Amino acid sequence: DQRRLSISTTYGVMIRLDGALDPESGRIVLTAIQSLVEPTQLDPTDTRYTYNVGSLLCRMGNVAEGVAQIRRAIELGGEEPKYYERLIVAMRDLGRRKELMEFLESRGLRAQYSAVLATIHLSLAREHVATGEGQKALDAVEMGLARAVPERLLAPLLATKAEAQILQ
């Protein structure tokens, strides 16, 4: 019997499927998988779905389309720091810094979650440091520090503040 199917977890999050099945078994497995990922069964207004599609597109090299999907997830109300973090990296990779800054500035006025605000203002501060705008970077850092800051973002905010002070 040459049939085999291996299912494993990689990096603690990704699922890997590998194997060889006879036609009948293969159709059963394929039907089961398709029922899980059939686009008509997924809610396109679900921010997690939209973010995951965007994130996957970025990892596959279609960064521009990935950015569009991640922005859509945020505009649909997705307030997860990872949404912003992935978007920031992708837009930097595309060289769309001005657009990134405009987007972050507009979201900084609307975001409610302190980790999202800190992420936004840290990124704005870093962009201002990169363009030599010390005072704008300091202002962004101060906005990021104005609310309760998650511990993982405190050191980067303070380091960026020091960089901005050097520019003064």
Image: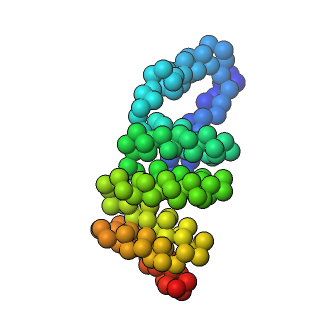
Where residue 153 appears, x then y in whole percent? Answer: 42, 69
Residue 159 appears left or right of 148: right
Residue 142 appears left or right of 29: left
Where residue 58 appears, x then y in whole percent? Answer: 62, 45
User: Which of the 4 image quadrants contains residue 141?
Assistant: bottom left
Where residue 73 appears, x then y in whole percent? Answer: 45, 41
Residue 94 appears left or right of 44: right
Q: How many marks?
A: 0
Q: Is residue 112 visible?
A: yes
Residue found 48% across the figure and 73% down from its top:
136
Q: Is residue 57 visible?
A: no
Where residue 66 appears, x then y in whole percent? Answer: 59, 42
Residue most extreme to the top:
24
Quadrant occupied by the N terminus: top right
- Coloring applied to the structure: rainbow
User: Which of the 4 image quadrants contains residue 19?
Assistant: top right
Residue found 41% across the figure and 34% down from its top:
46
Q: Is residue 90 above or below residue 50?
A: below
Q: Nearer the viewer, residue 80 or 168?
A: 168
Residue 25 appears left or right of 152: right
Residue found 53% across the figure and 81% down from its top:
163
Residue found 47% across the figure and 57% down from its top:
104
Q: Is residue 39 above or below residue 128?
A: above
Q: Nearer the viewer, residue 17 or 58?
A: 58
